[in-house]
Amino acid sequence: MELTTNRTPTSQNTILFSPLGFNLAEVTRMIEVARATAQLGMTPVFQIHDSGYDCLVDDAGFQRLPGAQPLTTSQAQKAIAFDQGRSFSHPFTETVVRERVVKERQAISFLGAQAVVHGTNPTSPISARAEQVPLIYPVPYIYSQAQLVRRQTIPFVPYRGVGPHINRLLQGPAVKALNSPWLMPKPFRTIAQENGIRLRGLLDLLHADYTLLTCMPDEFEGAPLPAGTVRVGPIFAHLDAELPDKVLELAAQDAPLVYCAFGSSGTASLTWRALGALGNAPVNVIAPVKQYLSQEQISRLPKNVHVTDLLPAHRLGELVDAAVLHGGQGTVQTACATGVPFIGVGLSAEQRWNVDVWVRRGNAVSLTAGDFRGRALRFHKSLRHILTDASVRATARYVAQEHKDEDGARESAKVIAQVTGNVRAQREKIRRWVD
């Protein structure tokens, strides 16, 4: 069909950002890219449906349009479990998907948006294509077209014991399932059809017109990237906040200082066990995990464990000696960029991948949530290793130097500026999605 548009031309190059509000990594990644687009003269505007970390967008001073009805806390947790592959259940009913697509299309039209940039907001691939604007996706390497084409093994289970064998066996069937229509939740297929968009499989919700890989070259080993895919480099949070005095006080003490964070994908049980294990180690601990614990639990923590709200982790490099992290790309990249060796507890295939990249380099150790149970012997051995092994600490410093000149947000903004400067090419690229 011939593509047309009824938008009113605008002198402003407006970009709509659509992260999932309950996903800390997505929100902070989008904030960093939005700041960079503003520096290049574009106008970033946010639309967020769900609550959780959406307040960070307001704190950063960005314009924001209202979204659809937010998911409840339990629904958001269900969405996170679905995203991590821990459950096939999800909260995205036809009503939810339809309302979100309507709101997003209204926002695109109202703004005359030149592009949509999303984290993993599952309705953006429908609304952006229906409105015939480019969809841009800053995303980790794993599950990208570049990674799947190379058939690199995905760590569906930890690489321990028979784990490598299981991962090899699952690789083929899993990739086939991602490309098949049966794994696509029916509400997305239904609403996509209502909007004249064809979705062939789940990967159509994970791909975009322009994919920006937020990774270091280690992950794809310098292999050629598919058309429409470019490596932009790491993007992680730079929260505009001061470090609490307590952090500086602990850093000045003789005991090593360990940073413990589980982003927005941790659990209360994991947090409690991890802090308990750290409490039995000869270290001080600073942990921005208040969202996972009750006040009563916090009061029962060992005296060397200090729980806080979110911290500007990018400022901790010279202050902390090691980190215990969940494996989310943002937290891993922050540790790497600041030269902090870490223990990664991947809670999904993507997070295990993020950790394993640096295990191979030598500045990280990969553990599982089960390693915090009981006496946590494997955890304590790993903690001693990253705190005392000179080669681990030297590698962490070297990795930090490699990250020094990387600026994924800036490179993303350059790509967005280039994409939005060629409207005709954009529409030709989008045409294939429209019935």
Image (cartoon, grey):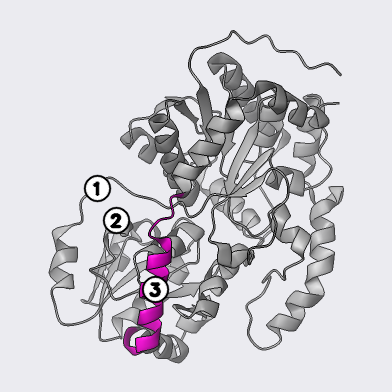
Asked if residue 247 lies in the magenta stretch, the reply is no
Q: Are marks 3 and 1 in contact (CB under 8 Å)?
A: no
Q: Earlier in the sequence, mark 3 or mark 1?
A: 1
| Quadrant of the image occupied by residue 126 | top right
> Residue 422 or 243: which is nearer the viewer?
422
- What is the three-letter code of the residue carrying label 1? Ala
Residue found 59% across the figure and 8% down from its top = 8
Q: Estimate how packed mark 3 is, as few (under 14), some (14 to 19) or many (20 or more) residues with alpha carbons within 10 Å.
A: some
Q: Earlier in the sequence, mark 2 or mark 1?
A: 1
> Residue 428 or 50: which is nearer the viewer?
428
Residue found 60% across the figure and 16% down from its top = 109
Q: Which residue is mark 1?
A: 241
Q: Are marks 2 and 1 in contact (CB under 8 Å)?
A: yes
Circle 2: element type: loop
- What is the three-letter code of the residue carrying label 2? Leu
State which region is magenta: 387-407
Q: Is residue 153 above or below residue 40?
A: below
Check residue 212 in the rendering and tell me which mark sits there, or answer none: none
Residue 341 in sight = no
Q: CA distance from mark 3 to mark 2?
A: 24 Å
The answer to whether 239 appears left or right of 68 in the picture is left
Circle 3: element type: helix
Q: Estimate how packed mark 1 is, as few (under 14), some (14 to 19) or many (20 or more) residues with alpha carbons within 10 Å.
A: few
| Quadrant of the image occupied by residue 95 | top right
